[in-house]
Image: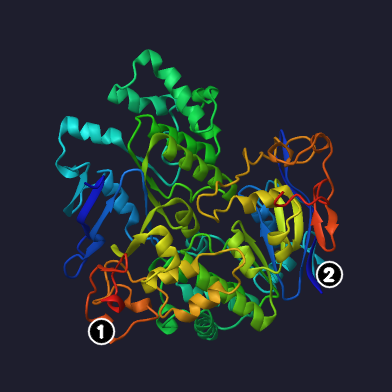
Amino acid sequence: MAFIDVKNIKKHFQLKKGVRGKGKVLKAVDDVSFKVEKDSVFAIVGESGCGKSTLARILVRLIEPTSGTVSFNGEDLFNLKRTALKKFRRSVQIIFQDPYASLNPRMRVYSTISEPMKIHRIVPSGDLKERVAELLTSVGLTPDMMDKYPHEFSGGQRQRICIARALSLSPEMIVADEPLSSLDVSIQAQIINLLQDLKQKHHLSFIFISHDLNVVHYFSDMVAVMYLGRIMELADTDELFERPLHPYTELLLKSAPKIGVKNRSKHVSNRMNATEIPSPVDIPDGCLFYTRCPKRFDACNRIIPQLKKFEGHSVRCLLYS
Amino acid sequence: MTLLDVRELSVGFSSLYSSIKVISDLSIHVDHGEVFGLVGESGCGKSLTAYSIMGLLPENAYAEGAVFFKDKNLLEIDREELRKLRGKDISMVFQEPMTSLNPVLKVGYQIAEVFMAHYGTSKKEALSRAVELMKAVRIPSSELRVNEYPHQMSGGMRQRIMIAMAIACRPSLLIADEPTTALDVTIQAEILQLIRNLKDEDNMSVLFITHDLGIVSEITDRVGVMYAGRIVESATVSNILNSPRHPYTMGLLDSLPTVKGKPLKPIPGNVPRPEDLPEGCRFSDRCRFAMSDCHDVEPELAEAAPGHLARCIRAGESLWHS
C-alpha cells in the first residue's frame, strides 16, 4: 500500500460568465494520478500556472477536488470525519512559498509555534515553552527568539520558523510549496541542508514543489513534470534528469541555468516554436504541448496522448506509444 | 574602451536623525560591447547602484563620487541633460515587467512615446516604428498586439515590451536589473538570448544585475561581486567561477546544489544590515577562513592575480577547494 495514492484528481474552476455566452472552465488540475512512498521526496515541477500549487492545496485538503480521490495511509482523504480528519491534519503539514505572508505579524514566535500543539493537545501546557525551545533549536534558531515578532527576522529565519511550526506536531509528511524561491542563494542552501537533516532524523516524506530544477535534482527521489494541469512525465529523479523522454521535460532541463553552460539560451530558443504558454482556459485540442513542441508532427494536433509506461517512465507523448 | 566608469561611488540615506551608507566606494567600469555582471544577494546595493547611474535615487538619498559616461559625470550634470540621456543613450530594464509598464496605456503607445519624447516623431510614425521594434524583440503578430494593454500579455511578453522600449533609441548602455527573475526558466532563456543578440548587433554594452550565478556564467564577460555595499571581488567570468579569490564568492558557489547527496556548504548567518556592519572585513563574521586580523582592519580591493581584484587579506592563498 502506497503512503499516498492520488487517483484521477481534477480541479476545475468555473469562471464567471461574461457579457456574451457562458463562462469558461479553467482546468487547473486535470486527471492527475501518482503514488508517494514513505520516507521519500516526491517533487512536482513545472512553469507558473501549471497547477502545482493547486495540487499541493488539494493534498493537504485546503481545497476539495472536482473529482478523484486521494488516499492517505489507505484512508480516503476527502471522506475523513472529525477525529480522523484531525489526525490527518496532524500528520500532514504545509510550508508555503512566502515566509513574509505565512506568519501572523501580530503573534510572537512562541504563540505561532505553540498554537498547533495547543489545538491538538499533544503537549501538556507546562511543557510548551520547553518544546518550543527545542523546536527552535532543531531548525537552527535560538530559544531566546521565541519572544520576538516575525518582523524582527530575515527571510531565511522566517522560513525556519515556518518549518518549526510544521514540525511542532511531529508530522509524517510535509508539503513544501516553493519553500526556497523567496530566499537568497546562500540561505537556500541552509534551508535545503536543514530539510535534508530533518528528513533523516524524523523519517519525513516530502512533497516538494519547485521550479528550480537544480534543487529538485539534488533533493528529490521521484519527479512529476506538470504542464497546463496535467502530468507530462513521471519518473525516478536521476533517471528523468539523465534521460528525459518528453520534449517538454527536455526543454525544461535545457532551460535551467547551469554554471559552465554558455549557449543554453541559444539552444532553447532555436528549438522552441511559439513562445507563449497557452492560456489554461483555451488549451489546445490535441497534445497540450503541441503549440511549443519542437518534435511535433501532424497527429499531435488531433490525438490527446495518454500517460503511458515507457522504459520505466510514465510519459504523455505520442512519440512513445 | 571604457563607456561607463563608476568611481568611488558612495550612496546613503539621510534623515533628520541619522545617516546610513549603503554603498561604499564602489568602482566599476563597463567597456564598449561587453556585458558586465553585478552579482550579490538582496540588500547588497546592486539595484541602488543602477539607480544612481540612472539618476533615479529617491529624494532622501545622497550619492558621492563620480559616474562617468562618455566623459560626462552623471552625478553632476543637470536634470534636463540627464533626461535627454536617459532612455536614449542609457536605458534600463527593470525586474518586474508588471509594475514597470503603465496599465492604462496601450503597449504600442508606451514604446512610441520614447520616439516622440526624444526625437519629436509624429504619433503615426512612432507607432509604426513601435511595431517594428516589437518584431525585433520577437513578439508574434505584432501588428495586432501593438494595441493591447499590458494586462493582456504574459510576463515574458511584457518583459519583451520593456526591452523594446529600452532599445528603441539604440542606447550604448543597457542596464538590466534582474530582468529574468520573475520569469519561468524557458522564457528566461529566450530573454537572455534576445539581450545577447541585440548586444551583438549594435555593439551595445550591458550592465547586468543578477543574483543567479548560472545566468552570470551564461551571459556576462566580466563580473563584480557585491557584499554589504562593497565590491568584494571583480574579474573575468571564468576566473570568478573557476578560481574565486574571495571567500564570499566561494560560499555562493558552494551553496549551489551540484552532486546529489553531497551536503551543501551554505554561508552561515545572515547578511548584515548597513547600520550594523561588523568591525574589520564586512564578511569576517560569516567567513570560514577568517583570522584575527580580519576582525580589525577592512582589507582593500587589491590585485590577487593579474586582472583579478579581491578584497581579502588571504586572497593570495589558494583557499578555493581546500
Give how far across and how far down residue B124 sits, in percent: 51, 85
Q: Which of B8 and A47 is in front in this view?
A: A47
Give how far across and how far down residue B53 sits, in percent: 72, 61
Give how far across and how far down residue A264 sits, in percent: 55, 72
Q: Which residue is drawn at 25% across and 84% down?
A: A299
Residue B153 visible here:
no
Q: Residues within 10 Å of mark 2 (few under 14, many from 20)?
A: few
User: In this rendering, do the residues under marks 2 and 1 share a single chain?
Assistant: no
Q: Residue at x 46, y 41 (%)?
A: A195
Q: How crowded is mark 1: few (under 14 residues within 10 Å), some or many (20 or more)?
A: few
Please tell me whether mark 2 sits on a helix, a strand or a loop: loop
Residue at mark 2: chain: B
Q: Residue B71 carries which label?
A: 2
Q: Residue at x 27, y 71 (%)?
A: A282
Give how far across and how far down residue B166 sits, in percent: 60, 72
Q: Is residue A136 left or right of residue B64?
A: left
Q: What residue type is labelled 1?
A: Ala
Residue A6 to residue A110: above or below: below
Residue A56 to residue B203: above or below: above
Residue B219 to residue A164: above or below: below
Q: Nearer the viewer, residue B204 or A87?
A: A87
Q: What residue type is labelled 2?
A: Asp
Residue B215 visible here:
yes
Q: Which of A154 and A230 is in front in this view?
A: A230
Residue at mark 1: chain: A
- Residue at image mark 1: A299
Q: In this view, does B272 lie to the left or right of A288?
A: right
Please tell me whether mark 1 sits on a helix, a strand or a loop: helix
Occupied quadrant, residue B282: top right
- Measure the C-alpha gap from mark 2 to mark 1: 61 Å
